[in-house]
Image (tube, rainbow, N blue to C red):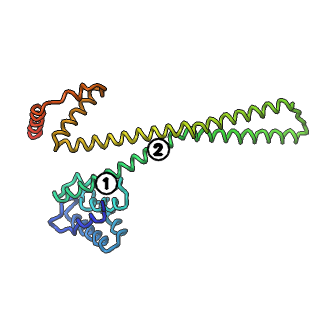
């Protein structure tokens, strides 16, 4: 959706367009400020227009046109999570039916994009948490190695300064060095195995599961929305919910018990009557 083109739907407010979102004197002042902001944007001064709208929306949160227009400008800058908050606010306010249709079309796109960015951020956080223990272990090994080297150097300097001589058996020195080399080699091999063999498999499996969950969430959302206007989809949704409630059995016991057209129609009619009664 080209959000900048959506600004063509907005127009300068007149007295008949106003609602009492503030004391009467402030309503006209805020409306005039809104009209100036809209004109600034149409004249090409987008930055000043956005700053003015941000202030109006902050001072008058019940001013629907200001929050609506500011949300569209945020969405045009790809700031979808901020735009979502302002458009959600407008959905709760008193606006005309034409404005509501326009708002719902925009809100659906903004919400979808905001959810994508939240999921991407969640994936990054999960990866950081997975790598945190490994990074901590590597950092600790580096610190211990530096501390060990510094300690040995300091001790040798102290002995030399005092005029003492230390004689260490050459065989013991060789064994110590060999043990240290073998230990570091084993640790290095373990880290290499983790990074090049184990970790890629974990990340791949995690990505596959996240993709499946995302696909399933999209399918459930679309199925729920379209079931209201399609008998076949409503029937499929009923079977799917029954299968979930039954513990997702692997046999055909859920799918095989399809309700009849008459019973489903009667049930839908009863639900309509109940809804109307409420």
Badge 1 local density, few (<14 within 10 Å), some, or many (20+)? many
Provide the secondary structure element on which disc 1 rests. Answer: helix
Residue at 12% over, 36% down: 268
Q: Position of residue 258 (x, y in %)?
A: 18, 30
Q: Nearer the viewer, residue 109 or 182?
A: 182
The residues bearing labels 1 and 2 have C-alpha atoms spaced at a distance of 23 Å
Could you say which disc has been placed on residue 40 in the image? none
Could you say which disc has been placed on residue 125 in the image? 2
The image quadrant where one finds the C terminus is top left
The image quarter in which residue 152 lies: top right
The image quadrant where one finds the N terminus is bottom left
Residue at 67% over, 33% down: 186
Query: Is there a contact, CB below 8 Å, between mark 1 and mark 2?
Result: no
Q: Which residue is mark 1?
A: 110
Q: Position of residue 128 (x, y in %)?
A: 50, 43
Q: Position of residue 51 (x, y in %)?
A: 35, 65
Q: Position of residue 180 (x, y in %)?
A: 74, 34
Count the numbered circles shown. 2
Q: Nearer the viewer, residue 245 or 237?
A: 237
Q: Is residue 175 left or right of residue 128?
A: right
Provide the secondary structure element on which disc 2 rests. Answer: helix
Residue at 47% over, 40% down: 204
């Amino acid at each position: 959706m080209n959000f900048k083109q959506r600004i063509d739907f907005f127009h300068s407010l007149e007295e008949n367009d106003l609602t009492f979102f503030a004391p009467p004197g402030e309503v006209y002042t805020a409306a005039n400020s809104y009209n100036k902001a809209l004109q600034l944007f149409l004249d090409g001064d987008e930055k000043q227009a956005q700053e003015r709208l941000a202030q109006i929306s902050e001072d008058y949160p019940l001013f629907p046109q200001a929050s609506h227009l500011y949300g569209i400008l945020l969405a045009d800058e790809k700031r979808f999570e901020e735009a979502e908050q302002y458009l959600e606010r407008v959905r709760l306010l008193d606006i005309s039916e034409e404005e509501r249709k326009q708002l719902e079309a925009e809100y659906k796109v903004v919400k979808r994009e905001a959810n994508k960015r939240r999921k991407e951020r969640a994936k990054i956080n999960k990866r950081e948490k997975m790598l945190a223990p490994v990074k901590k272990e590597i950092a600790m090994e580096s610190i211990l190695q530096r501390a060990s080297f510094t300690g040995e150097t300091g001790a040798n300097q102290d002995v030399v300064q005092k005029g003492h001589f230390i004689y260490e058996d050459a065989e013991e020195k060789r064994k110590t060095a060999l043990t240290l080399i073998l230990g570091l080699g084993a640790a290095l091999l373990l880290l290499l195995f983790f990074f090049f063999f184990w970790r890629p498999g974990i990340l791949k499996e995690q990505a596959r599961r996240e993709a499946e969950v995302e696909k399933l969430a999209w399918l459930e959302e679309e199925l729920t929305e379209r079931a209201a206007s399609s008998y076949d989809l409503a029937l499929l949704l009923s079977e799917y919910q029954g299968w979930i409630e039954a513990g997702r059995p692997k046999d055909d016991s859920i799918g095989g018990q399809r309700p009849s057209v008459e019973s489903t129609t009667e049930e839908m009619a009863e639900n309509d009557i109940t809804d109307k009664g409420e």
